[in-house]
């Protein structure tokens, strides 16, 4: 790693050389098309669910395709309908396991709300008041979702524990079984639709979300197993399965809360910073790399960077280096919307080009 000049950290991110590249055609979306590795992977996924972060659920192919957006809404409608059917059977049968599965499906559907916010508000241009646009609305939606999932996990856990302490007969077992199969079928249909459309439009994120929906369907089969246990006379089977599903909801809650917290605190993967620094160092004319800052605004990244250039370079030459550095970043960093690159001259003879700013920092 090249050593940045001591004064590089004083680069003013508000300086010139800001070149926002909105809708640039370089295809910076990154895929998430990973499978779950058979039964072992599915079991691991139930313990540690997939990411519900908006940035992981959308890529360039999906965002720019009407078909991809339509697939999102169709799949959300499918999960919503499945949740409504299961909720009706919960009211009829009193099954705690089915209640947990219903809340689990509802939680999965709710976590797509930031995407809806992203697609609707994200297209609004910045204003003189909201100069960075409206991407932060995703994070506010994320806070509301975390609170909703937390409430659902409390309800599921309380109901299951109460049922274990005070056993209650589960009625209409046939309806519970049908609802469990409906939950499995609903997730499987959503999975197939997402995977089919994702492959057609080239959206790795949509394909990955389809694979996750397929895995989530196995939670519904656990409800079917609980109904079978009750039919055999094991009255504890239904609340026991309910507690197991509650654990899955809590795992979703933990991950969602952690991701929302990190977004609110402007956290990014340190590997992205490493990639940014490497791209800057590889740019012709960059002598060293100074401060590099990245932040998420919605499901897109913005960067503020400083690079050290030859002090003998003209303003035009320094500007060219800054532009090429930004261009390199746009190719190197997935989901980078724009970058502000400030060119600093390499200090010579002990000259501090930022001395006037020291008292303000």
Image (cartoon, rainbow, N blue to C red):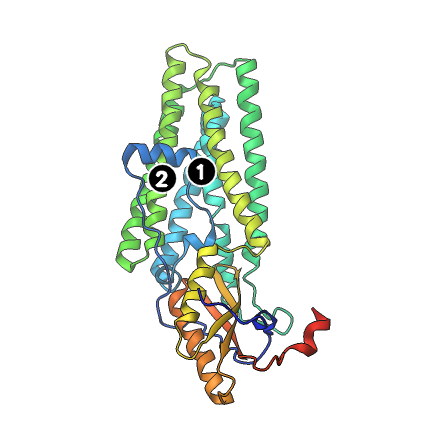
From the image, which quarter does the C terminus lie in? bottom right
Q: Residue furthest right?
A: 359
Image: 155 above or below 269: above
**Residue 169 screen position, x and y as percent:** 48, 14
**Residue 341 screen position, x and y as percent:** 51, 75
Residue 226 numbered mark, or none: none
**Residue 181 screen position, x and y as percent:** 34, 30
What residue does disc 2 label? 187
Query: Quadrant of residue 157 in the image?
Result: top right
Residue 105 numbered mark, or none: 1
How many numbered tags mark residues here? 2
Which residue is rendered at x = 41% and y = 68% of the image?
Answer: 279
Q: Residue furthest front?
A: 349
Q: Is residue 184 at all visible to an observer of this figure?
A: no
Tag 1, which secondary structure? helix
Query: Quadrant of residue 201 in the image?
Result: bottom left
Going by the image, does 173 lie left or right of 188? right
Q: Is residue 342 at all visible to an observer of this figure?
A: yes
Between discs 2 and 1, the one toward the N terminus: 1
Circles 2, 1 touching at the beta carbon (< 8 Å): yes
Give me the C-alpha separation between circle 2 and circle 1.
9 Å
């Amino acid at each position: 790693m090249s050593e940045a000049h001591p004064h590089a950290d004083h680069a003013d991110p508000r300086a010139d050389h800001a070149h926002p590249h909105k809708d640039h055609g370089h295809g910076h979306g990154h895929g998430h098309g990973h499978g779950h590795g058979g039964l072992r992977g599915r079991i691991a996924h139930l313990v540690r669910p997939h990411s519900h972060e908006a940035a992981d659920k959308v890529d360039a192919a999906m965002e720019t395709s009407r078909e991809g957006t339509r697939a999102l809404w169709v799949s959300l409608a499918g999960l919503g309908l499945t949740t409504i059917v299961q909720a009706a059977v919960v009211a009829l049968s009193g099954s705690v396991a089915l209640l947990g599965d219903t809340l689990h499906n509802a939680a999965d559907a709710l976590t797509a709300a930031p995407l809806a916010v992203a697609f609707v508000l994200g297209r609004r241009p910045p204003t003189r008041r909201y100069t960075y646009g409206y991407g932060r609305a995703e994070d506010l939606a994320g806070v509301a979702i975390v609170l909703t999932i937390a409430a659902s996990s409390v309800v599921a856990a309380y109901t299951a524990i109460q049922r274990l302490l005070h056993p209650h007969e589960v009625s209409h077992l046939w309806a519970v079984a049908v609802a469990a199969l409906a939950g499995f079928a609903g997730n499987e249909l959503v999975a197939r639709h997402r995977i089919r459309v994702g492959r057609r439009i080239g959206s790795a994120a949509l394909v990955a979300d389809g694979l996750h929906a397929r895995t989530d369907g196995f939670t519904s089969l656990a409800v079917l197993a609980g109904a079978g246990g009750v039919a055999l006379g094991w009255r504890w089977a239904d609340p026991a399965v309910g507690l197991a599903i509650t654990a899955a909801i809590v795992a979703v809650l933990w991950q969602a809360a952690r991701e929302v917290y990190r977004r609110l605190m402007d956290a990014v993967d340190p590997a992205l910073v490493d990639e940014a620094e490497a791209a800057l160092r590889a740019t012709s004319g960059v002598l060293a790399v100074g401060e590099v800052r990245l932040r998420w605004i919605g499901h897109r990244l913005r960067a503020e960077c400083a690079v050290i250039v030859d002090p003998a370079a003209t303003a035009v030459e320094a500007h060219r280096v800054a532009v090429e550095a930004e261009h390199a970043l746009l190719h190197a960093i997935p989901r980078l919307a724009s970058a502000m690159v400030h060119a600093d001259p390499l200090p010579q003879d002990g000259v501090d080009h930022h001395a006037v700013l020291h008292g303000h920092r």
